[in-house]
Image (cartoon, rainbow, N blue to C red):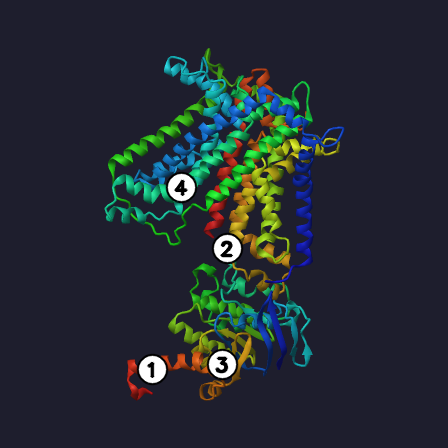
Amino acid sequence: MRSAKPEMRVIFTVILLLFAVFLFLPLLILLVRSFGSDRGFTLGHYASIVADREFVAAIGNSVKVSGVTAVITTVLGFILAYSIHCTKIYRPVKGLLKTVIMVPMLLPTITYGFAIMYSFGNQGLITRLAGRNLFEIYGWNGLLIGYVIYTLPPVFLLIHNAFKYIDKKFIIVSKLMGDGTMQSFMNTIMRPLAGALGGAFVLSFILSFTDFGIPASVGGTYPVVATQLYQVMLGSIPDFNQGAVIAVMMLIPAVFGIWLLNYLEKWNFHYDKLSDIELPRQRVRDIAFGVMSSAIVMGMLSIFAVMFIAPWLSSYPYDMTFTFQHVRDVIQSSDLTGVYRNSLWVAFLTALFGTLMAYLSALLNVRTSLKARSAVDIVSMITNTVPGMVLGISYLLFFNGSSLKGTFIIIVLCNIVHFFTTPFLMAKNSLSKMSPSWETTGELLGDSWFKTVYRVILPNSASTVIEMFSYYFINAMVTISGIIFLVSAQTSLVASKIKELQHFAKFNEIFVLSMLIFFTNLIIKLVCDAWQRRTAQR
Amino acid sequence: MLKLEHICKQFDDKVVLDDINVEIGTGEIVSLLGPSGSGKTTLLNIILGLTRMDQGKIVFQGQDLSNVPMKKRGFNIVFQDYALFPNLNAYDNIVYGLRNKKGTVSKQEVREYIDFLELQPHLDKRIGELSGGQKQRVALARTLVTKPKILLLDEPLSALDGVIKESIKQRIQSIAREFKLTTIIVTHDPEEALTLSDKILIIHQGQIAQFGTPQEIVHHPSNDFVKQFIIKQLHIKRQNIYNLFGEQYA
């Protein structure tokens, strides 16, 4: 391979320095603080946390509710993916299922909680349709519903992608060899998918375990780790050392989970040659899965429905006359529009610089001969592991005295680091598929490295760059766990504002703001998808 | 004239090239022939300036190029996968380098190269719409308009089928004659090497097994390797053709 150029070294050094300051050092400080005291090293903070009965209960609760969530979500995700890949359901229905399942990704998790309240609460939409209170929503039930909705899209995507690598010819072969239905199902579907299903469980578990938005809204008096962490850090008597300990405790299952995820990846089958094959018709199977998957998606949508209805009514559910009042109030409130503007601004900057950083990292990682280029792979593994709340706390501890505190810069950087893994892997995948000779050819034709990147590499990965941008934008728009410790009065974002409005029970404002986020994300998604299709066609 | 003197290259502990000494005359077509892993592509990359050699000298027309970087050597290459840029059409690929070196080639000359390679009907096509042979010719045109002092070709025929292969072979020969262009080709196919080039450099395990004209190699193979792997393959091929057409066509 060609030798590394000075300009590559400079960019690489800058990237590594950024990660040193905005990932490694903050995490290091977090670790130090969890062991630190005025008198040096101590295990005292850990001891006092472990002795704290409420906290131990919170860990138990988190594990229990995340575990049950993970089981349910994996089953639901499998049913959806199976319906799309292995049944002969009417094609447009499949397309609709695939699209609608992504809806929750466009909303902050804290909104889910309020949607659940308005659906299943005493006067909720679904409660009224059912004629009675179905169950108590604050605590266990609310958390469970919220987590399932939150983790279903990523779990579905994971299983859906694994299905793409399964050769469906084997289903036919198994039938021809005389396997029974159950045996055929086990051999050609379950066994090849075992790794992905395990991975789906782990993913759902970690996401639920580390999420803050859902317990913040419907957690009630049921303590989980995330709410404990929030109370310790931002409660009436903040205790940074204890916060650091809880953050470390939150990090441990995440580290274990990611390790498990990588391990399970090896279980997956990768048939090297895939061919499309017509599946035999089976009415019972098709109808059963068609009904089940539609029910899952409809159930999910019905919970969000109230969010789009309530703000247009005078006083849901008591006075059901139509009004623009609430929407007008929000638009006229300079406070709320300012917060929305902040969110847009942060999401845009995150998307712009995040995409740049992830793209350059991937470019140097797969298309140069820099000696330390695999360092970025390690970075991407770490960013994949560290939960948003843990990263946020680390920043809070590390940058507390600095001038970065309370600025947009620190929020944008936190987002860039927090969501780095996926865009980085997208870019890496796309860049590694290109001809390895382009840079050499460009150089022989008189280009500098930058010029070849600009004239050849970038145009040929435009579609991926757009996808990366959209991913960063949407995630920056909806995240709450990453930024909750970093926002100040001046840099308040929509997601954190919702948390604030909760105290004043201003649910109409909450839903209007959520709709704003939703439609902004929807527009970004649709525009990016259309643009991506156009560049891909060329 | 291109002189390679005592070229050695090692990757980690593995010796890839061991004391290569060759002289290539101006306008000659020379094939580097050898099985995969013999070091022939490494030698091509060393001549190009892409790979650094551990020891030895490269002298071109009396000038020592050993420490001259790739970009300044003035050689150019067509890669095995052609490395055409899919975001540009055939014409924009051909003139890609001219933006960087304005004035080296006139519009008229570009047209001549295009006509010579019969690319006129394909200029507006996207790279994905071109056939293998057309891609090869576009890549050749893109390289030729930079007026390289030596043309390097990495497995130029391996991705092409039957008839196209023969026509590209003739094309390469006529380029070398027409522009008096020294051409160095990497290949693993003895038939290709012996029918295409003026001289063949057979490399085996990083060393020169034989360097000579096709006649010398066929009639006076210098060692067992050349006999076993090069000549024997040609004999089998000849036998197969005889069996098809009958001995009288010998």
Residue shown at the point (54%, 48%) measured from the top left = A427
Residue shown at the point (69%, 48%) measured from the top left = A14
Disc 3 sits on a residue from what chain? B
Tell me the mark number nearer the camera, choosing from 2 and 4: 4
Callout 1 crowding tier (Cα within 10 Å): few <14, some 14–19, many ≥20: some
The reply to whether dot 4 and dot 3 touch (C-beta < 8 Å) is: no
**Label 4, label 3: how far apart the Cα atoms are:** 56 Å
Q: Which residue is nearer to you in this view: A118 or A140?
A: A140
Disc 1 sits on a residue from what chain? B
Callout 3 crowding tier (Cα within 10 Å): few <14, some 14–19, many ≥20: many
**Label 3, label 2: how far apart the Cα atoms are:** 34 Å
- Left or right of A236 on screen, residue A299: left
Tell me the mark number nearer the camera, choosing from 2 and 1: 1
The residue that label 1 is drawn on is: B239
On the same chain: label 2 and label 4? Answer: yes
> In the rendered view, would you say A276 is above or below A488?
below
The residue that label 3 is drawn on is: B197
Q: Which residue is nearer to you in this view: A218 or A209?
A: A209
- Which residue type does callout 1 highlight? Gln
The residue that label 4 is drawn on is: A194
The residue that label 2 is drawn on is: A433
